[in-house]
Image (tube, helix red, strand yellow):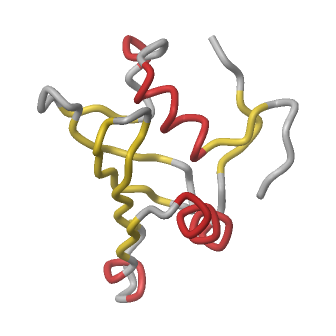
Amino acid sequence: MKKFKGYLNHQQILEACIKADFDVDTSRYDNGGDWITISGQFADQPLQIIYASFNGRFIGKSPEGDVFSEMSAELEGTDWYDAILDFLYIALDEQAA
């Protein structure tokens, strides 16, 4: 299991989305909410996730339509899920974007 030391804050996630050419909707956040919506290709799977940059939590639907979150340990090792983790979180041996 890969270990992480933290998660991207709001500004870091916006910069990462631009760099990855992902669509990001900040309207909920801009209106006082906690969540932003990120849409993009994670390991060649078109996915949309909702991410809270204040605590690193996320939720989405798998390519099969099942709901997943940062707590879905059973999905670790799945290419698209691991790509989400690598995108949102800072590995123990990495620096933030």
When the figure is inspected, residue 73 is found, relative to residue 97, above or below; the finding is above
Relative horizontal placement of residue 48, taking residue 51 as reference (left or right): left
The answer to which of 29 and 63 lies nearer the viewer is: 63
Is 77 placed left or right of 12 in the picture? left
**Residue 47 location in percent, x, y?**
29, 45
The single residue placed furthest to the bottom in the displayed view is 31
Toward the left, the furthest residue is 65
Residue 39: % across, % down: 34, 58
Residue 9 in picture, x, y percent from top left? 65, 63
Residue placed at 44% from the left, 62% from the top? 22
Q: Decide: is 54 above or below 43.
A: below
From the image, which quarter does the N terminus lie in? top right
Left or right of 2? Residue 53 is left
| Point 64% across, 42% down: residue | 89
Q: How many marks?
A: 0
Q: Residue at x 34, y 64 (%)?
A: 37
Along the line of sight, which residue is nearer the eye, 61 or 22? Answer: 22
**Quadrant of the image containing the C terminus:** bottom right
Q: Position of residue 73 (x, y in %)?
A: 44, 16
Residue sitting at 56 percent across and 70 percent down?
A: 18
